[in-house]
Amino acid sequence: MNTRFILLGPPGSGKGTQAERLTLQYGMPQISTGEIFRYNISNETELGKKVKEYVQAGALVPDELVVDLVLDRLAQSDAKDGWLLDGFPRTIVQADAFAANLTETGGAIDRVLYITVPKDVLIQRITGRQVCEACGRTYNVNSFPTKTSGVCDHCNGKVVARADDTEETAKVRIDVYEEQTKPLVEYYRDAGLLTEFDGREPVDVTYAKIEAIINDSPATRMAAE
Ligand code: AMP
């Protein structure tokens, strides 16, 4: 099914949670640049060494590193029938480079799903966030805790906080978002591609709204016919 969606929103808005569920339901790969970077950092790869300082400081990784990485990932066979981008693009430069590539390859973005959440709520969410080291499921000590502290409900893996989820780094990441990523809201609105969601609503409510949009996309309708 050729569904091509971008999740846009500040850190802590719930993009990753929605992406996890959407890929389970629709099967398109979730391409999370943040997750690719964290994987490379923990495995001490060449890419990991190059990006570590930026990620730990909450700064953006330079555009040229990110764009090539995403284009390579999108060229893999599992992405040929659609994708869900989570955390990319994050700058106008990235969005322009991505648009140029789509034009070249004859692809297109179906919709940009923009999740908004006020800053004070974001900090609270980010600092409570936990992730399973083994299966990647996400939890939150305040709103969605594991049944047993530190243990994943799903696979019994160890559940930990991300290294960049401290209050200090969260504030930097939100400022970076405001300055460098938020301009993409107008960029995609002007392109007629943006749909906005209130990320303070329960996860299920936002999910149902996103689901309705995906089910109504031309590729999904065609697959159902
Ligand atoms: P995330 O998991 O999306 O919150 O990303 C974690 C970190 O990875 C960010 O704070 C950045 O340092 C880096 N990162 C992820 N995606 C991008 C991107 N598209 N451009 C630049 N840096 C990124």
Image (tube, rainbow, N blue to C red):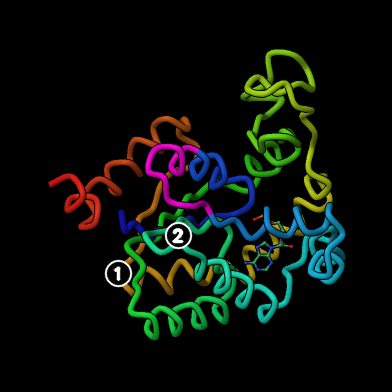
Name which residue lies at 55% across and 74% down: 71
Which disc, if any, is residue 11?
none
Name which residue lies at 56% across and 65% down: 88
Q: What type of secondary structure mainly makes up the magenta span? A: helix
Magenta region, residue range: 21-30
Whether residue 68 is visible here, answered yes or no, is yes
Asked where in the image residue 91 lies, by quadrant, the reply is bottom right
Residue with the most extreme front position: 77
Which is nearer the eye, 122 or 157? 157
Asked where in the image residue 48 lies, by quadrant, the reply is bottom right
Q: Position of 42 compared to 7: left or right? A: right
Name which residue lies at 30% across and 48% down: 214
Mark 1: which secondary structure?
Answer: loop
Asked where in the image residue 191 lies, by quadrant, the reply is bottom left
Q: Position of 57 compared to 223: left or right? A: right
Mark 2: which secondary structure?
Answer: strand
Residue with the most extreme left position: 225
From the Cβ of disc 1, is ligand 1 less than 8 Å away?
Answer: no
Which is nearer the eye, 144 or 47? 47
Q: Which residue is the site of mark 2?
A: 6
User: Percent position (x, y) of residue 158?
Assistant: 79, 28
Question: In the rendered structure, which amino acid carries the disc numbered 1?
Answer: Gly
Name which residue lies at 63% across and 71% down: 69
Q: Position of 116 compared to 63: left or right? A: left
Magenta residue check for 28: yes
Which comes sooner in the sequence, label 1 or label 2? 2
Query: What separation in Å lies between label 1 and label 2 (alpha carbons)?
Result: 14 Å
User: Percent position (x, y) of residue 35?
Assistant: 68, 53
Instruction: Locate ligand 1 by image quadrant.
Output: bottom right
Q: Which residue is the site of mark 1?
A: 192
Question: In the rendered structure, which amino acid carries the disc numbered 2?
Answer: Ile
